[in-house]
Image (cartoon, rainbow, N blue to C red):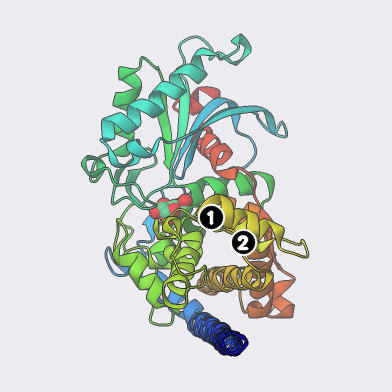
């Protein structure tokens, strides 16, 4: 019996030892597996970082390519990926604009309706108010009538609430500046046809239509009496709004949902301009730089995949690398890759991570700016947005690193774009540098501090210390709406009555 028990005990001990060995082996295997996974994830991150590299020399090539494309786009219609659209604005605000004007600002996730009272010479902006609404996603892919009706309705409501003191004098119609931030081939200051949609809009029956005619019809349907006096891109509005407060503004850049630039060009330097030379000799150009593309752009597999799956494949490549609509999506794609190929978030790939555009740039920005020692915000965002819980600090750090890679590439490329524009204007190498103000606006620039800081530093680095002191980057808050109102004022039907 005793002996038997001894045997059992030995057997148990053997089994126990085997189990310990087994568990130990499992732990080791698990560790090896997880360290193998970690190594794999790090390899993917490293490769991504390398592919996104933007050393100064590359940025200068990008800037030069931008300058070359600007020349080509000005020379002939279709001469470049850059449309270099003529805005019909040859006269930027001077400060003597007067009266009550409306503005409609459509072009991103939100749209705004504004009422602005301009005080004439030295009067400045006496009063401004606005209302904002988001565009229901269904309208972004519906019909032209549905979109314009929706806008006209909001405008009708806003007008109906107008205080008596803002009423127009008898016999005078209300006038509106329409900021429509998509590529438009203008035929005059207040007419132009939509070339194509960008930024996730895809309303096919609007392409090729006169935007002002579409809006005017919708205003009539909704019973709003209003004349569209100016049709402008947001870059043009920002340039106009910026110039109103600072006469040195000569370039404007939008970094928001999309990205674009406008600048003041000598009319004679626009071979494709066949109109009479403006008295001022100048013409503001809407570059549509979002569509810039060059072999020097550091594109990755993630950019290619995002582009192929987008509503506008092959188009807006620069925009897809630099603007707010896309930065979060690029990050999501890299996170998905490390989840799939290196089980970065556990054995199961988190389902939410597979949903395109679920990770928005504001969420990415919140993670990027997390200053807590345990990266609490990163953990919370991963949980709230992607339903990924229990991430280690080490993993959160990688997420922040990825935010930084994507953002730095975007901001540095945007800075290179600005340098390209300055070069075209001849401002990068003047012996006696003129003070030039670049008016910037857009949610990305305004709210993503890391992006903005990186852009400003890079631009300073690229133009060199000497020139940097004469190039000022200024945030032109909400310039585009006010700018549209100002341009409506300077193109008012009643202007002659006053003089
Ligand atoms: C897109 C539009 C452009 C606009 C920019 C910024 O690139 O095509 O017209 O200016 O976004 O909103």
Q: Secondary structure at mark 1?
A: strand
Residue 325 percent location from the top left of the image? 47, 55
Badge 1 vs badge 2, beta-carbon distance below 8 Å: no
Q: Residues within 10 Å of mark 1 (few under 14, many from 20)?
A: many
Residue 390 circle label: 2
Q: Residue furthest right?
A: 373
The residue shown at (31%, 38%) is 211
Residue 99 appears in view: yes
Q: Which residue is mark 1?
A: 254
Left or right: where 233 falls relative to 438: left
Q: Quadrant of the N terminus?
A: bottom right
Q: Quadrant location of residue 431?
A: bottom right
Residue nearest the viewer, comparing 210 with 276: 210
Residue nearest the viewer, comparing 396 with 491: 396
Q: Residues within 10 Å of mark 2 (few under 14, many from 20)?
A: few
**Given this view, does label 1 or label 2 mark the residue nearer the observer?**
2
Residue 293 percent location from the top left of the image? 38, 72
Residue 80 percent location from the top left of the image? 32, 70
Residue 456 percent location from the top left of the image? 67, 68
Q: Residue furthest front?
A: 1
Residue 249 appears in view: no
Residue nearest the viewer, comparing 185 with 25: 25
Left or right: where 199 falls relative to 257: left
The residue shown at (64%, 60%) is 378
Q: CA distance from mark 1 to mark 2?
A: 38 Å
Decide which of tag 1 and tag 2 comes sooner along the chain.
1
Q: Does 104 sit above or below residue 347?
A: above
Left or right: where 137 falls relative to 161: left
Residue nearest the viewer, comparing 76 with 160: 160
């Amino acid at each position: 019996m005793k002996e038997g028990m001894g045997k059992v005990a030995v057997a148990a001990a053997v089994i126990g030892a085997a189990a310990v060995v087994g568990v130990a082996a499992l732990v080791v295997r698990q560790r090896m597996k997880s360290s193998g996974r970690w190594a794999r994830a790090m390899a993917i991150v490293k490769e991504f970082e390398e592919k996104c590299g933007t050393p100064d020399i590359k940025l200068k090539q990008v800037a030069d390519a931008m300058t070359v494309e600007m020349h080509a786009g000005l020379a002939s219609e279709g001469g470049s990926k850059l449309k270099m659209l003529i805005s019909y604005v040859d006269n930027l605000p001077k400060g003597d604009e007067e009266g009550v004007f409306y503005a409609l600002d459509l072009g991103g996730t939100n749209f705004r309706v504004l009422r602005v009272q301009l005080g004439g010479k030295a009067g400045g902006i006496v009063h401004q108010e606005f209302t904002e609404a988001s565009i229901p996603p269904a309208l972004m892919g519906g019909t032209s009538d549905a979109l314009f009706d929706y806008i006209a309705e909001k405008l009708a409501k806003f007008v109906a609430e107008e205080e008596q003191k803002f009423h127009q004098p008898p016999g005078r119609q209300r006038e509106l500046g329409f900021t429509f931030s998509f590529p438009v081939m203008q035929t005059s200051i207040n007419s132009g046809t939509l070339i194509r949609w960008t930024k996730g809009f895809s309303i096919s029956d609007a392409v090729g239509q006169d935007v002002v005619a579409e809006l005017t019809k919708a205003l009539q349907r909704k019973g709003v009496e209003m004349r569209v006096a100016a049709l402008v891109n947001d870059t043009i509005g920002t340039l106009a709004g910026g110039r109103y407060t600072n006469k040195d503004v000569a370039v404007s850049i939008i970094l928001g949902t999309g990205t674009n630039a406008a600048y003041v060009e000598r009319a004679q330097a626009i071979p494709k301009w066949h109109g009479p030379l403006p008295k001022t000799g100048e013409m503001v150009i809407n570059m549509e730089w979002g569509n810039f593309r060059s072999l020097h752009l550091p594109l990755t597999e993630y950019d290619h995949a995002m582009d192929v799956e987008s509503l506008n494949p092959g188009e807006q490549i620069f925009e897809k690398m630099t603007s707010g609509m896309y930065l979060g999506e690029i990050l999501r794609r890299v996170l998905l890759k490390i989840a799939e190929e290196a089980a970065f978030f556990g054995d199961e790939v988190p389902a939410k991570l597979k949903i395109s555009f679920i990770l928005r740039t504001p969420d990415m920005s919140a993670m990027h700016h997390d200053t807590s020692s345990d990266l609490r915000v990163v953990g919370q965002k991963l949980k709230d947005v992607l339903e990924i819980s229990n991430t280690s600090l080490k993993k959160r750090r990688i997420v922040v690193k990825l935010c930084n890679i994507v953002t730095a590439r975007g901001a540095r490329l945007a800075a290179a774009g600005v340098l390209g524009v300055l070069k075209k204007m001849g401002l990068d190498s003047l012996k006696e540098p003129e003070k030039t103000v670049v008016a910037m606006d857009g949610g990305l620039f305004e709210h993503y501090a890391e992006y903005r800081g990186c852009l400003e530093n890079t631009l300073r680095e690229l133009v060199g210390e000497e020139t940097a002191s004469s190039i000022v980057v200024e945030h032109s808050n909400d310039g585009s709406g006010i700018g549209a109102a100002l341009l409506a004022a300077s193109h008012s039907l009643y202007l002659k009555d006053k003089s």
